[in-house]
Image: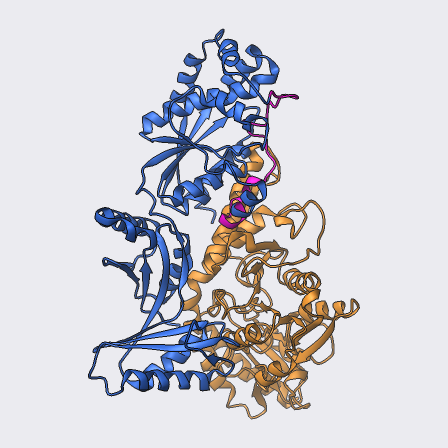
Amino acid sequence: MIYLDHSATTKPDPAVLQTFIQANERYYANPASLHQMGVEANALLTRAREQIADIIKTSPEQIIFTSGGSESNNFAIKGLARANKHRGMKILVSAIEHASVLESAKALEKEGFTIDTIDVDEHGVILIEDLKQKLTKDTVVVSIMHVNNEMGAVQPVTEIANIIHQNSRAFYHMDAVQSFGKIPVQFKGEDGPDAITVSGHKINGLKGSGFLALRKQVNINPIIHGGGQEMGYRSGTVAVPQDVALAKATRLAIEKQPQKALQYSKWRDDLHEFFKQFPYVHVLSGSEGAPHIISCAVKGLKGEILVNAMQHEGIIISTSSACSSKEHTVSHVVRAIKLDPSYEKGVIRMSLGEGITDADIETFKAVFSKVMHQVKEM
Amino acid sequence: MKWHEILIRYGEITTKGRNRKLFINRLKENLRYTFADIPNLRIRSERDRMYLSSEVDTEMEELIERLPHIFGIHSFSPVAQCEPTLEVMKDLAVEIVKGMDYKGKTFKVNVKRSFKKFPMETYELQQTIGSYVLGSLPGMTVQMKNPDIELRVEVREKAVYMMVDVIHGAGGLPIGSNGKALLLLSGGIDSPVAAYYMMKRGVRVEAIHFFSPPFTSDQSLGKVKELCEKISRFGGNIRLHVIPFTEIQQKIQSSVPENVTMTSTRRMMMKVADIVRKEIDAKAIVTGENLGQVASQTLESLAAINDVTTTPILRPLITFDKLEIIEVAQKIGTYDISIRPFEDCCTVFTPANPKTKPRVEKMNYYESFTDFDEMIERAVKNREIHSFPKKKTDEFLDLL
């Protein structure tokens, strides 16, 4: 089986699993407990937090462990908006954000916030002019992802951060779930976002782990209330083994990032070239996109049929995104790029990750050609 | 922004006359020590200035971020370099100002042209660069006297140097240039702030903590260790002497009247500290005491506590308001650690009605029935010594 759905989730790294098991065996005490075992668990948790802070260059107090990307996104948007109402009541999001961002913003509408959406071009890159126009003095949170999960579009985040910081008092939250460990993520200085979301299971870590990192101390309201864990930002007994495993996954992801980016871009370029021979296949990812995501649309076909046919041949790919693949509607991202309607149901996504070889890519090409032949003839 | 080097201005060191070189060298060594994790660091010192540089951009940023914590530095400026042609200079000037909060600010260009063969006159250069910057970055106005942003341009034969930011340093004197003192570190809010002020005056600090297990917990000790870690940021390494104090504290409880147990405890702490001070060759004892804050901090009480030693006891916070102390603690990042609620040696046996005006003679009398000295010696001998900052290679390495 060849797994090409790493944007949906990745296989945990054996070293990360090892850490998880060891941490569960030895440091299972509640880190808030006063006894020695609690102290040790807390020390381990602290080191994990420091390690992540070191890697992304912020201070440990600004790392909040969460259950993953969706929670971090919810927390960032709701927490920042609610705590900083005095700055304004407007929230700006791009049209191609993950559902956890869009739905969080929508939920805030009921509290009196207004939402504005920034448009994107055909490759899914936001229109800077549109951002400039919609960014007003009363904007409190702007959420624009780094790499889009469906198309691999990379946003010009440095420019975005600069525009936001120079023209407003808004916080810039960046969903880095698909970029972390794939391309460099800058999180320092005025050029960087104010908050980023990272998810464990997208970087060969565990599901149910993730963090929200803040660039500096800001006002943010918790969404989970209780015993005041995580500096009061997120209550609930801290999942020490998950978080330690996340720290390890984070380190490994960053160490391997440059090498992987080279490798994946090579395959991506190769596949872009390969798809050109099919006149009815339209590659959606731009050549400037993320190295690990290749998405394309097949004219007059349903993506689901291709996913099934490919699976039959031992190759796992997905329709536009796993999160929405069980809905029978066209994805909001595909809508946003204004794809020709005859293509919009036939979007498939190949996402690269650990363990793929040159041979796998060759096999993919052969199988794809064969499957195309079959389904197109039907 | 690509900075070429960082120019450091000394401040108070410049008043040091013939000893100046000693102070400068001390600062240089401190910088080397503090930035040991920056492998490409180069330091060049001159009489009035010091220059730091690294070929790696991220290291330069790191330096700029961490320099404001180093004592002995009045101010510093990142300096950028470019080749001496007008076009390049104009671009660099814009790039530098762009990186600042320039909107609505007043602005001026100040050119020094030590390379006299440069084809443009100083005044002309000033105008050309100035108007180019103003044209590219709207929102600024020109002001010759005290502008908000002064872009300084130095034209030399081989290169042009530009700087604009003057970033405030921590001031004070380089740590270690004024000897060593022993700090009584309880884990509360005050003592780390006292350490900060001593370090600011160039004093190297070692810390002593009284630990009373099982009455005080490992977490209470952990707090103190974290505080040491935090304050070591300001001046190289700090050693922490952890004194096993349970036996002495229990003895005090059983042998002196309840309302003076606190005074007696402080006196014993002072005696212990004085022995350690001698051993480590420190010249003074430092406390975070503050007049009138608690019962042990009245003038009478301080007198009674002081009576056990002739060593200078420095109390940098003696006149501070509590709120002032909290403000500094927050600024130096110790507050959040200090307020964690664990019992420490000073709070674990607090009497209900401590005497605010203890008398020295009475204290001597009460304590004369017990051989405290033997216990004190034992406590000093059995102390644990920890060094900070701790290396981050620890028992968790295989997990992370």
Is residue A28 or residue A344 the one in the foreground? A28
In the picture, measured across the screen, residue B203 lies left or right of residue A84, that is left
Q: Tell me the magenta residue range.
A: B329-355
B101 shown above or below A39: below
Q: Is residue A250 visible?
A: yes
Residue situated furthest bottom in the rendering: A279
The answer to if B331 sits in the magenta stretch is: yes
- Shown in blue, the chain is B
Residue at the spot 59% in from the left edge and 91% down from the top edge: A280
Residue at image position (46%, 55%) is A54
On the image, the x and y values in percent for residue B17 come to 24, 49
Main SS class of the magenta portion in the image: loop
Is residue A325 in sight in this rendering?
no
Q: Nearer the viewer, residue A207 or A61?
A: A61
Where is residue B244 drawn, in percent x and y? 47, 23
The extreme front residue here reads B145
Image colour for chain A is: orange
**Quadrant of the image occupied by residue A139:** bottom right
The image quadrant that residue B283 belongs to is top left
**Does residue A279 appear left or right of residue B232 in this picture?**
right
